[in-house]
Image (cartoon, helix red, strand yellow):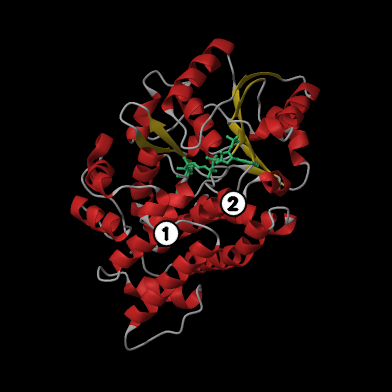
Amino acid sequence: MDNFTFYSPTYFVFGKDQENDTGKYVKRFGGTRVLIHYGGGSAARSGLLDRVKASLEREGISYTELGGVVPNPRSGLVYKGIDLCRKEKVDFILAVGGGSVIDSAKAIAAGVPYDGDFWDFYKGKPVTEALPVGTVLTISAAGSEGSSNSVITHEDGMYKRGAGGDAMRPVFSILNPALTQTLPPYQIACGITDMMAHLFERYFTRTSDVEVTDRMIEGLLLAIINEAPKVVKDPADYQAQANIMWAGMMAHNNSCGVGRSQDWASHAMEHELSALYDVAHGAGLAVVFPAWMTYMLDRGGVNRLAQLAVRVWGCQMDFENPVNTAKAGIEKLKQFLKSIGMPINFSELGAKEEDIEEMAHKACYGDGGDGTIGGFVKLNKEDVINIYRLML
Ligand code: NZQ
Ligand code: ZN
């Protein structure tokens, strides 16, 4: 296991009706003038936004609003939010929505106290200062409610990039599983795929003796695989949604990733797909991950893949030919993703073969890239092209 530091300051409030106390938590964490940031309409339609506003009013906290965050959130609204916060002297950002809303809120929070262009953070500058962000989560997926990251697409060039820094971790996150009951099954399945991908990105490591985090990842995957069919079939299943919601947070606040090298090439390849075709992040990952795993079969990935196949997918270990076990595990993953309604190839995603070269170039070199991606195996542009081809 490698040396590490781990800082997870977020105060989590979990369970039914907890959003009615949002105002109390904003006050507790020092907010006096709040920007409520939200998406395209689901939070207004469900009445959630009104309940949150009422709770702020009960605490005598003033607020201003900025809605309209789209999935795969854009830079334009971030610039607008930064200007608005400065003009209104906002001292707290409250994100009401999913990963996209939370990421946009984090970008605004980092941008307000910063003299330069907020995009510098998405080119690799660590975020060390930000306004406090609180969240009321409405979808189990990205894990942004507990993570130190934010992912934004710059409209100038359509670069989808991530920024990071503990200063961006939310000060509180309210997780009421009942709020996710209005999600369509497809969106739920996208979220499940994303949280599984966050676990895979950490599982494929070059660090040895990481038994605790290996077992945590495997345990979370087993729980997700068990609960997923229930929530996709019946989004009203509160207990299954509760398990999925906490799994999504655990998968990405990095408690399972400490002390080990991680990969993240699949996320980089997916970000090109969602930047170009505006597909849901989880749907893109459903196509990318099996292809990346297949490419790893003859690049040193067999042992990890076979271990995953045995411990998570229940495959029999073939000691003479562990590659057979590894392949069986990849097949199980594909079947599972298909069973929850995810796409499995380029055409189902609406992606085009002729764009492969451009996406590979952007993934490796675009906007500050050094020509390679991935920590488990360093992939160059040619590798990335080969992996995209496996998705056809
Ligand atoms: O905009 P509204 O109307 O709210 O609709 C949203 C949106 O269309 C809808 N939705 C959310 N909650 C709902 C609901 N519909 C009905 N009922 C509800 N309760 O769902 C759609 C998707 O929302 P979005 O926030 O985009 O989903 P998600 O949480 O999956 O976030 C995806 C974004 O997070 C990034 C992704 O790249 C993508 O841009 N990621 C962020 C990470 C992070 N910050 O740590 C890590 C991830 O790897 C990921 O890259
Ligand atoms: Zn993700």
The residue lying at 25 percent from left, 53 percent from top is 384
SS at circle 2: helix
Q: Along the horizontal axis of the image, is 139 left or right of 59? A: left
| Residue 33 vs residue 341, the one in the foreground | 341
- The residue under label 1 is 344
Q: Position of residue 273 (x, y in %)?
A: 36, 45
Q: Quadrant of residue 329?
A: bottom left
Say which element carries label 1.
Answer: loop
Q: Quadrant of residue 297?
A: bottom left
Is 164 above or below relative to 188? above
Closer to the eye: label 2 or 1:
1
Out of 52 and 346, give the one closest to the viewer.
346
Image quadrant assignment for residue 145: top right
Q: Position of residue 38 (x, y in %)?
A: 60, 30
**Hey, what amino acid is under mark 1?**
Ile
Residue 10 vertical position relative to residue 302 in the rendered view, above or below: above
Q: Is residue 357 above or below residue 213?
A: above
Q: Which mark is residue 188?
A: 2
Q: Label 2 is placed on what type of residue?
A: Ile
In the displayed structure image, the side of residue 388 where residue 134 appears, left or right: right
Q: Residue at x 39, y 79 (%)?
A: 325
Q: Position of residue 386 (x, y in %)?
A: 23, 58
Marks counted in the figure total 2
